[in-house]
Image (cartoon, rainbow, N blue to C red):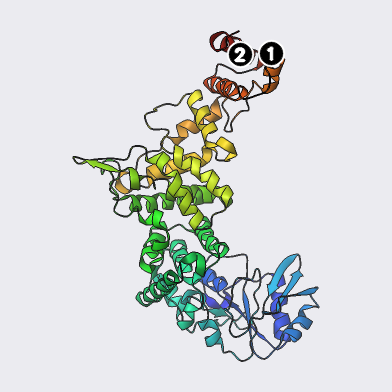
Amino acid sequence: MTDSTSLVSLTPAAIAVVEAIAAAGGRPLVVGGSVRDALLDRRGKDVDLEVHGHTSVAEVTGRLSVLGHVDHRGQAFGVLAIKVDGQDFDISFPRRDSIAGAGARGFEIDVDPNISVEEAFGRRDFTINAMGWDPLTGELIDPYDGAADLRAGILRHTTASFRDDPLRVLRAVQFAGRFRFVLAPETVVECCDITAAIARSGGLRNAVSFERVWQEWRKLARRGLAWTNAMDALVDTGLIQFYPELAATRGVEQDPGWHAEGDVWTHLALAAEQAALNAERDCLSGTDREVAVLGALVHDLGKVTHTQNTDGRITSRGHAAAGVAPATAFLRSIGAPHYLITRIAPIVREHMSHIGIDQPTPSQVRRLIRRLDANGAGATIHDWARVVDADCAGRGPSAKPSPANRWLDVAANTTVGDTPRKGILTGEHLIARGYIPGPEFTPLLAAALDAQDDGSIHDEASALAWLDEYEANHIER
């Protein structure tokens, strides 16, 4: 843990903002995730500030205006926005009945002259986020022993105000997955009570906006490395009831020769975790990481309906194709955007395509690439390989080497490439032959594309030669 006397490294812009608040009569405290991450030696980009002491929006605005133009946004919360040295700051003044630190970007400055530091921090979600650091004195302010919970890896709520926002239950899952934390018993009780209330209200969709739900899942996909902890938290809090496609994998058995780790639920947790670790190793970020991690999480959902135990022999034939529908339903339920769902769905369908193929041919690789990008889905062979890698590694003691690199090598070291090639034979060629545009174009061009993937067509001359042969064998003159 970092020494608290110089806990957070402030940029010149941050120092200027701190000094402006102090000059306005306020006591600026660095709070929330900034302090938590600093204590974990994780340096973040944002610095969240909360103002205590007797000051006002007008006084702070006046001091900040020396640094740049101050915009006023939002009547209910009194949000100020300012750019200092090219950096944007959102400065908020929430009322007593608002949730402190509810998501402003950059610098968050919350002013209420009648609220104590302890009371203000008690409105935050977890003890690990309810700490403050005084940049003027170097004092660490920790009324709820958040630093101790941070050291122990425990996620504990602060006060009864935890119930103010139902999303905090999902945040518990997100933090468990990001920091490998376990929930305190009393926090589990609180979360279960909130979850029960959510269920009575008609479900998560009625209690929290999809946008906010997706923000938490996206953070987990982009930053989480402990998916086993996250999934344990889903069960402990009761939130798993809102994700039936994932819940149904619990207890679904697998062939122990291939999956010594246990049921499908366990495998998916390990696969998602492995995908996240691989993404971290490869510096994968953004949407590419979301595809890899969430693709690994949902790749075997089809086993729920396609697993059979016949005289002790466990099989799941056809589960890859069957998994597209439940994977799509789950991704929609977490608020994932459409472009992400369309990119993951073909990976789920094709994640078993390597089975039975020791060394893929260029034709097999071309066909896989085209199937992954069918209908412009945008999934690449690299997306597919990352999920296959995670599938093979996420098996505990039965982990095995992934064959995906052999497919990537063929794509890289031959004329295949890693994106689908456009059809060489086109409608213009058919029109030049006297064809009238119509329904017969579709099957003919599809057959030509198939021949191209086989390697029979590789340029315009071979395309026209193929058309000659096709006409001789299929078209009556």
Mark 2: few, some, or many residues within 10 Å (few <14, many ≥20)?
many
* Residue 12 appears in view: no
State the image coordinates of residue 370 (x, y, percent, origin top left): 54, 32
**Quarter assignment of residue 10:** bottom right
Task: Say which amino acid is labelled 2.
Answer: Leu
Foreground pick, 336 / 411: 336
| Residue 336 appears left or right of 87 | left
Task: Say which amino acid is labelled 1.
Answer: Arg
Which residue is at 64% across, 81% downward? 94
Element type where label 1 sits in the image: loop
* Residue that mark 1 sits on: 433
Q: Are marks 2 and 1 in contact (CB under 8 Å)?
A: yes
* Residue that mark 2 sits on: 467
**Quarter assignment of residue 257:** top left
Element type where label 2 sits in the image: helix
Which residue is at 42% across, 57% downward? 227
State the image coordinates of residue 117 (x, y, percent, origin top left): 56, 86
Foreground pick, 24 / 270: 270
Q: Quadrant of the C terminus?
A: top right
> In the drawing, what numbered circle is on residue 63?
none
